Each structure stands twice: as structure tokens, then as C-alpha cells.
Image (cartoon, helix red, strand yellow):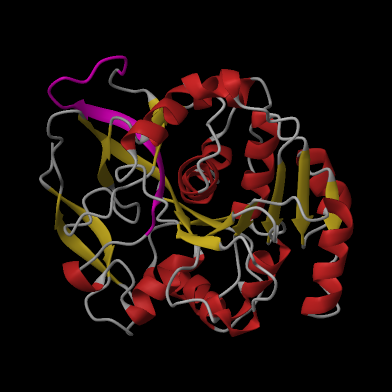
């Protein structure tokens, strides 16, 4: 087997990725597997990595993308339940050497951050999952401390009486958050943003328009939840706009807002009436950082997919490990254009 491979490298923050032909092929350590990469999924944070150094500045040259699908080509020590040739979807860890990331021919995957792909699910369908579903898994069942439906605490938790607000339901993370809320059996799932019929099919009980300004949107939410909301997830907004989710929280009960964009403090000058107080909880959507929560989810994911309890999302495909093609997708994110989640086919 060859010892080097093709990869797309980010060599300097703020510059385009480039193709290299002599990237060392990584080898699996204990509880790891090596994958022949078939699909690498691009997400908005990859543009921030290229242009701003997010997750990348500490490990240049860096390989991008944290959604990976491939076939197992080597097993590390202590790996059970996997075999050479298995199709696998994985979420790379944020390792300085980028050995787990997708835009290279071979990558490493951690047991506990991967799942075998059922025969009924395509590579591309599986590749819609890792980044966009693990963030709400951790946001809902970690940061907000709603018991995960697969956890021992689920038996004693009153999901049916629970109210949850999801801001940014039209985003990929928001759509998976809705599905996870349905999976848990949460009784009232209020979503702001997104297409109503599609979100209700995924599990939303109420969909509120995001238009009209803060006060109008807050009134729509409050008409549904009253003063009883203690759980909110903001999947899309920057800190300046996260006050909406906080203001929707109950005044008489202490509530919490989990946010997927924690890059600055919330401006609390616009918060009103929170006499019981509130918590702002940051979400870092890494399986490796939350093994006790993410590990069981990855183990259960194949049966959730087969049962239709987790449904893959929309995607588009580009073929070949081509720097110009990947840079063009990242440029569209940078320029604020609407981008369908894009998958790079390496095979």
C-alpha cells in the first residue's frame, strides 16, 4: 500500500486551499479505524476555518471538513464490531494533525464517534449527519440537561409536559434538533424559522415566523408557551440576536438557552423580566469532548436511521478532490449566498 496520498491543504489562514500529492497516510491507533474516504461534507464552519482560522490555526497545514463517509481499510488495537470493508460515517475530532478530516484520500476515525451505515442509507445521506446532528445532541441532552431518550434518566422524565424552543429551525442543525426532540417525545416543540409543513413533518408542534422583528416574534412564541418555557436552543443566531431566546424563557422559573454560536458574550441589555434568572450555555458539538453522551448515540444511530426516526437532509454533490471546486463552495458561504450542503465525492 502507498504511504502518501492526495489531500487539500489549508497552508495559510485567509488563503485558498491547495492540492498536495504527498500527504502522509495516517495509521489507526487504539480504538481507531482507517477509512478510504468516499464523501467529505462541507459545512459553514469550514469557511470560517479557511478564512478566520476557526479550529485550524493551531494545526497548519490543515485538512478541512468534519463530515466523513468511507470504508474501513485498517483496524486499530481493541476495535470490535467493525470489519475491513464496512461502510462508516464519522465525525472527526479536532486534532492538530487533521488526520481525521475528510478532504484527503484516507482518514482516521474514532470508535465512539462513528457508526456503520445501514444498507438502506446512501453514503451521501449518511454524510449529512455528523456535524449537524451532534451539535443539537449535545445542546439538548448535554448543555440543557434534558435527559437523552436512551439514558437511564429518561424513564423518570416528563417529556410530554416539556416545552422546547428551537431558534433557526430551517438550518440543518435546527432540523436535526427538531427530529431529536420528537425522538425524545417532547410534547411542545416550538420552532422559529423554516418551512412549516416540512418542520411539522420532522416533529415540530408549532412553527412561528421569524419575520417582523424581536417583539413580534417574541409575542408569537409567548402565545404558545406562556411563561413556562425553561429550555431554548439557538441554532443560528450570532450573540447580538440571541436575546430573543432568552426573553422567551420563563420569568418565574429559571431557564436556560443553549447556543451553537458562542463566539462572544450575549448583550444582556435587551433582556427583560427574568426575575428567576437564566443561564446561557455554550455548545461545542464534538463527539470526542462528550463521549458519555455521543458514544451511545452513535451506537444507536443505525437503528434510528433504519426505523426512519432520524431522517437525512438535503445535499448536493461535487466530484473529485479539486481545490478550485472546494474553494468556490467556501467562497459562497463567505459571500452570504444560499448554499445547499455540499458533498465532495473522492471516489
Relative to 12, 77 lies left or right:
left
Can residue 342 be seen here? The reply is yes
The image shows residue 206, relative to residue 152, as above or below, that is below
Residue at 31 percent of width and 52 percent of height: 101
- Nearest the viewer among 184 and 32 is 184
Which segment did they paint magenta? 65-82
Whole-percent x, y for residue 110 in the image: 27, 36
Task: Note whether 194 is above or below 331 in the view shown.
Answer: above
Quadrant containing the C terminus is top left
Left or right? Give the position of 270 relative to 188: left
Find residue 247 and report its image quarter: bottom right
Residue at left 86%, top 53%? 224
Q: How many marks overall?
A: 0
* Residue 120 lies in quadrant: top right
Q: Give yes or no for residue 229 being in the magenta stretch.
A: no
**Res. 119 in view:** no
Residue 321 placement (x, y as % from top left): 38, 59
Identified at 31% across, 76% down, the residue is 53
Give how far across and how far down residue 150 sits, in percent. 52, 23
Amino acid at each position: 500500500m502507498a504511504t502518501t496520498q492526495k489531500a487539500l491543504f489549508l497552508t495559510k489562514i485567509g488563503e485558498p486551499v491547495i492540492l498536495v500529492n504527498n500527504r502522509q497516510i495516517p495509521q489507526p491507533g487504539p480504538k481507531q479505524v482507517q477509512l478510504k474516504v468516499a464523501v467529505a461534507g462541507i459545512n459553514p464552519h469550514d469557511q470560517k476555518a479557511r478564512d478566520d482560522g476557526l479550529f485550524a490555526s493551531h494545526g497548519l497545514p490543515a485538512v478541512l471538513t468534519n463530515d466523513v463517509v468511507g470504508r474501513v481499510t485498517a483496524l486499530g488495537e481493541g476495535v470490535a464490531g467493525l470489519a475491513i470493508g464496512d461502510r462508516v460515517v464519522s465525525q472527526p475530532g479536532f486534532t492538530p494533525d487533521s488526520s481525521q478530516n475528510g478532504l484527503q484520500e484516507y482518514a482516521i476515525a474514532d470508535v465512539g464517534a462513528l457508526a456503520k451505515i445501514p444498507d438502506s442509507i446512501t453514503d451521501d445521506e449518511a454524510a449529512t449527519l455528523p456535524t449537524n446532528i451532534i451539535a443539537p445532541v449535545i445542546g439538548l441532552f448535554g448543555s440543557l440537561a434534558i435527559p437523552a431518550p436512551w439514558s437511564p434518566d429518561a424513564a423518570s422524565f416528563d417529556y410530554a409536559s416539556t416545552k422546547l424552543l428551537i431558534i433557526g429551525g430551517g438550518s440543518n442543525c435546527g432540523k436535526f434538533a427538531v427530529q431529536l426532540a420528537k425522538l425524545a417525545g417532547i410534547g411542545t416543540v416550538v420552532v422559529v424559522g423554516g418551512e412549516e409543513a416540512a418542520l411539522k413533518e420532522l416533529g415540530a408542534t408549532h412553527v412561528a415566523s421569524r419575520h417582523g422583528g424581536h417583539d413580534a416574534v417574541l409575542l408569537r412564541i409567548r402565545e404558545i408557551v406562556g411563561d413556562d418555557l425553561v429550555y431554548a436552543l439557538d441554532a443560528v443566531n450570532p450573540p447580538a440576536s440571541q436575546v430573543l431566546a432568552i426573553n422567551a424563557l420563563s420569568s418565574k422559573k429559571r431557564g436556560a438557552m443553549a447556543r451553537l454560536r458562542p463566539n462572544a458574550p450575549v448583550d444582556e441589555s435587551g433582556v427583560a423580566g427574568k426575575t428567576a434568572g437564566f443561564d446561557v450555555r455554550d455548545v461545542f458539538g464534538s463527539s470526542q469532548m462528550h463521549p458519555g453522551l455521543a458514544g451511545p448515540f452513535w451506537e444507536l444511530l443505525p437503528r434510528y436511521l433504519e426505523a426512519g426516526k432520524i431522517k437525512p437532509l438535503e445535499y448536493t454533490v461535487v466530484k473529485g478532490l479539486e481545490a478550485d471546486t472546494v474553494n468556490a463552495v467556501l467562497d459562497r458561504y463567505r459571500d452570504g449566498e444560499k448554499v445547499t450542503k455540499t458533498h465532495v465525492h473522492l471516489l
